[in-house]
Amino acid sequence: MLGSIRSLKNSSVVVFLLMIFVSGQASLLRADEYVTCESKNDRRSYCNVSGIRDSNIELDRKLSKSPCIAEQTWGTDSRGIWVDGGCRAEFRVTRRYSSHGGSWGGHKHKDLEYEREKLELEQERLEFEKEKAKHEAATAQAPDVCPKGFRPGRCEKRERKKGCKDMRTERGLGCRTN
């Protein structure tokens, strides 16, 4: 039993370290890009940003005399960044992964999320196994049946579940065991 608890502790440490590694990798995968977008003739224009759902867009530098106000003269939607009313600006696109090809392009960020979820589930499973082992160790010490004999005082709930009965004696209440 002690060996299995030690292996559970070691497994928990490994899972914890892997989670730190994966979350560290995710932060290393951030890559900033800059997109210049301008409204021509005070009309709405779009600048395509691939993977916009996995990106954070911020106005980095205003380049026009016209105002660039979030959700009024610039914003984002599923098509990309839009600008309107003469706004011309440089926008910073922060991604969770690099889209320049390479080893972290494409759907690698999804794989990373999947691996992180697997590690979290494994950690939960190990915690459950650890608690289960503790419970089994505690219950293994207590007999599963009512012990033979008699003891003074009322039976406890766990003793009643095992078949022990409360009884009156000359000396007062007692717990009769089989």
Image (spheres, rainbow, N blue to C red):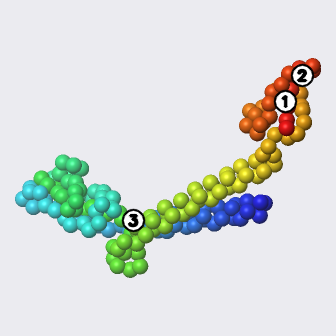
Left/right of residue 137 with respect to residue 90 in the rendered view: right
SS for dot 2: strand
- Residue 96 numbered tag: 3
State which mark lies toward you, 3 or 1. Answer: 1
Q: Tag 2: residue type?
A: Thr
- Count of numbered badges drawn on the protein: 3
**Mark 2 residue crowding within 10 angstroms, few (<14) / some (14–19) / many (20+):** few
Q: Tag 3: residue type?
A: Arg
Quarter assignment of residue 83: bottom left
Residue 54 point in image, percent of width and height:
33, 62
In the picture of the structure, the residue carrying the numbered disc 1 is 175
The answer to whether residue 98 of the structure is visible from this angle is no
Asked whether disc 2 touches disc 1, contact meaning CB atoms under 8 Å apart, the reply is: no
Residue 73 point in image, percent of width and height:
17, 51
In the picture of the structure, the residue carrying the numbered disc 2 is 169
**Mark 3 residue crowding within 10 angstroms, few (<14) / some (14–19) / many (20+):** some
Vertical position of residue 112 compared to residue 88: above or below = below
Q: Tag 1: residue type?
A: Cys
How far, Cα to Cα, is label 3 from label 2? 76 Å
Quarter assignment of residue 160: top right
The mark that comes first in sequence, 3 or 1, is 3
How far, Cα to Cα, is label 2 from label 1? 10 Å
Asked whether disc 3 touches disc 2, contact meaning CB atoms under 8 Å apart, the reply is: no
The mark that comes first in sequence, 3 or 2, is 3
At 51% from the left edge and 64% from the top edge, which residue is drawn?
118
Vertical position of residue 2 compared to residue 173: above or below = below
Vertical position of residue 167 compared to residue 101: above or below = above
Residue 50 point in image, percent of width and height:
26, 68
Left/right of residue 54 with respect to residue 89 in the rendered view: right
Split into 4 quadrants, where in the image is the C terminus?
top right
Residue 102 point in image, percent of width and height:
38, 80
Split into 4 quadrants, where in the image is the N terminus?
bottom right
